[in-house]
Image (cartoon, rainbow, N blue to C red):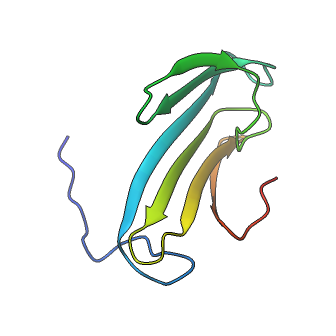
Amino acid sequence: MTWNIDYEKTFKCASCGGENLHHDAVDVYFRNHEDAPEGMFIRCADDLSIKFVPPEGNPSNRRNGLVISFWCEGCDDKSQLAIQQHKGTTFYQWRHDGDEHE
């Protein structure tokens, strides 16, 4: 498969509107089955840790989830793109420094 990147589509900083967002970390939450109380948590960042944890931090209450952390080169704002599944539908939500984390 070949990726055809559309360079007109960029994420923008929620604080300053800048386009220079840097990936800081990627967190992957995987449950062995639906509603499992525990699963695998993989963080791809400087420490490259892999560990089993309860689902705290998982954007999905029942299934798999993904969180990509960013920081803005223009204003140093930190933000996260959270992706979750629910009944075959995929949802996303942006959170940044000023938001309350649920």
Q: Is residue 96 left or right of residue 35?
A: left
Can you say whether 10 is above or below 55 in the image? below
Which residue is pictured at 37% across the width and 76% down the height?
Answer: 19
Q: Which residue is at a point 38% across and 70% down the rendered structure image?
A: 73
Residue 62 location (% of width, % of height): 78, 33
Count of marks placed on residues: 0
Which residue is at 65% across, 66% downward?
A: 97
Quarter-of-image position of residue 55: top right
Query: In which quadrant is the N terminus drawn?
Result: top left
Q: Is residue 97 above or below residue 92?
A: below
Please state the horizontal and vertical placement of residue 89, each as a whole percent of the image. Answer: 65, 48
Query: Residue 91 at x, y = what percent?
Result: 64, 54
Tell me the residue at 71%/71% (across/down).
98
User: What is the x, y in percent for residue 27?
Assistant: 54, 37
Give the image quarter of residue 44: top left
Residue reaching furthest to the left: 2
